[in-house]
Structures are given as C-alpha cells and as structure tokens.
C-alpha cells in the first residue's frame, strides 16, 4: 500500500514565484543589451561608411540644397552662435564635472570609462578631420579657431555623447522614467539644433552633422555595453524590480 506524501505548503508555487521574475528580468536585460549593441554597430558602421565615402570625395546630394536653405535663416547670427558655442567650452566643464561626480560617488568604473570615451571622441574627431581633410563650405569665416577642416562636426558629436551619458546615468540611478524620456528627447533636439547651427553659420555641411549624429549614437551604445556590469549587480537599476530570489522568505 502506497501512501502519497502530503504536498509541501507553497512548495511549487513558491518556486515559480521566485524563479519567474528572475527569468523575466534576465530576458529584459538581454533584450536591452541587444538593443544597445545594435545601436553601437549601426551607428558606428554608418559613420565609417560616410567617412570612407567622404574621404573619396563623394558628393552628398543633400548637402548643397540644405546648406543653401539653412543659410537663409542666419539673420544676424546671434542665436545660432549661442547654440553653437553651447557645445564648445561649456561641454569641457560639463564633461569634467560628470567624471568627477561619478568618481566621488563611488562609480569609479563609469568615471574611468567616461573619461576614456570623451578623450577618444575628442581626439578621434580631430583625427578624422585631418584624415578626410574636407574643406569647410565656401565663404566660411577664415578666423574660425581650431582645425580648418569640416568633417565631422565635433560640436555635435561631443554634445550628443556627453549629454547622452548623463541621461543614461540618471536612468541607472533610478530617475523617473518620464523624466528620463523627456531628457532623452531634449538631448536629441539639442544635438539637432547644434548641428543646424553649425550649418546655418556655414561652418559645416549637413553631412558633417549627420555623420556625427551616427557616431554619437554608436558611442553611447558602446558606453552602455562597457559599463553594463552594474546593471547585473543592481537588477533594480536595469528595470528588473522585485525582490531577488535569494532574499525571498523560505516557508517551513
């Protein structure tokens, strides 16, 4: 005669309750990592393609029509110069401040990666300008400081990179999703306005700004992947939420 053992109260249900959220969070993290990896690959690949074509003197068909249209909006140039300069020296202060804040708050890995990314973006932008050696649009003010070449736009690349990293870190530190979404839109709009200002001021071609937008998006994808370990260490920062399975009470 076989006697069935009584079921353990909450046995199976407890197991599924603790394992299902963990697997769901893991799937969500993996999907997020894939999305950022795609952004990195597509952004940087697009930038490389545009760089190779521009190096070989490819004439982008939208450059001259958009440049001519944008030049009609210049007016006295004051507002456009303000927008343009907002992505110049102020970004140095903001970038250094971001690294310092990350370091002193204990996020030293992110601080180091941020510093390396900003150095690579700045040096890389100037290096590509020297390599491609694309002259600025005809009629450009010869007194523009810095490198005399046009491609790519360092203003756009650095603005998108620095402000993008700030939004990413705010999201990781638990900022409200609505705030993060609004700030992300603001960052994109700011990068577009900086690019437009550079075109209106006749300092860059539209393709210079477009290439920098692609490069900036790719760099942000790389940054997230390089600093992703903290998302695993703190599931709630990655959107996992809930109580870890190891912390769940074990009913007896």
Image (tube, rainbow, N blue to C red):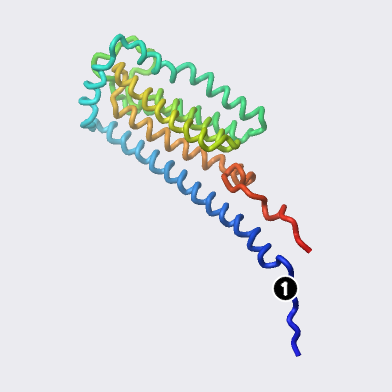
Whether 144 is drawn above or below 60: the answer is above
Q: Position of residue 240 (x, y in %)?
A: 59, 48
In the figure, residue 75 lies in which quadrant?
top left
Is there any visible trace of residue 165 in the rendered image? yes
Q: Position of residue 85 (x, y in %)?
A: 42, 16
- Comparing 157 with 79, the one in front is 79
- Comparing 252 with 202, the one in front is 252
- Comparing 163 with 143, the one in front is 163
Residue that badge 1 annotates: 7
Q: Residue at x 28, y 24 (%)?
A: 205
Q: Residue at x 37, y 41 (%)?
A: 45
- Comparing 20 with 159, the one in front is 20
Q: Residue at x 59, y 44 (%)?
A: 231
Q: Position of residue 11 (x, y in %)?
A: 70, 67
In the figure, residue 47 lies in which quadrant?
top left
Is there any visible trace of residue 127 in the rendered image? no
Q: Point out the image quarter for the C terminus.
A: bottom right
In the figure, residue 106 lies in which quadrant?
top right
At mark 1, the secondary structure is loop
Q: Position of residue 147 (x, y in %)?
A: 37, 18
Q: Residue at x 40, y 14 (%)?
A: 82
């Amino acid at each position: 005669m076989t006697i069935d053992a009584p079921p353990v109260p909450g046995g199976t249900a407890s197991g599924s309750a603790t394992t299902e959220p963990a697997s769901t969070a893991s799937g969500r993290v993996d999907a997020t990592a894939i999305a950022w990896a795609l952004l990195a690959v597509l952004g940087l690949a697009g930038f490389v393609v545009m760089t190779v074509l521009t190096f070989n003197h490819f004439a982008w068909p939208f450059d001259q029509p958009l440049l001519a249209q944008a030049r009609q909006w210049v007016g006295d140039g004051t507002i456009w110069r303000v927008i343009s300069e907002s992505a110049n020296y102020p970004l140095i202060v903001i970038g250094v401040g971001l690294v310092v804040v990350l370091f002193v708050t204990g996020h030293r890995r992110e601080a180091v990666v941020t510093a390396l990314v900003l150095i690579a973006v700045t040096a890389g932008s100037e290096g590509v300008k020297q390599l491609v050696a694309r002259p600025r649009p005809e009629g450009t003010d010869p007194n523009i400081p810095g490198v005399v070449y046009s491609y790519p736009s360092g203003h756009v690349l650095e603005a998108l990179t620095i402000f993008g990293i700030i939004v990413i870190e705010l999201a990781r530190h638990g900022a409200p999703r609505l705030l993060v979404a609004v700030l992300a839109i603001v960052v994109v709009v700011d990068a577009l306005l900086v690019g437009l200002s550079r075109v209106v001021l006749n300092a860059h071609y539209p393709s210079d700004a477009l290439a920098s937008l692609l490069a900036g998006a790719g760099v942000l994808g790389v940054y997230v992947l390089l600093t992703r370990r903290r998302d695993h260490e703190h599931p709630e920062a990655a959107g996992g939420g809930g109580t870890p399975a190891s912390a769940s009470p074990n009913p007896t």
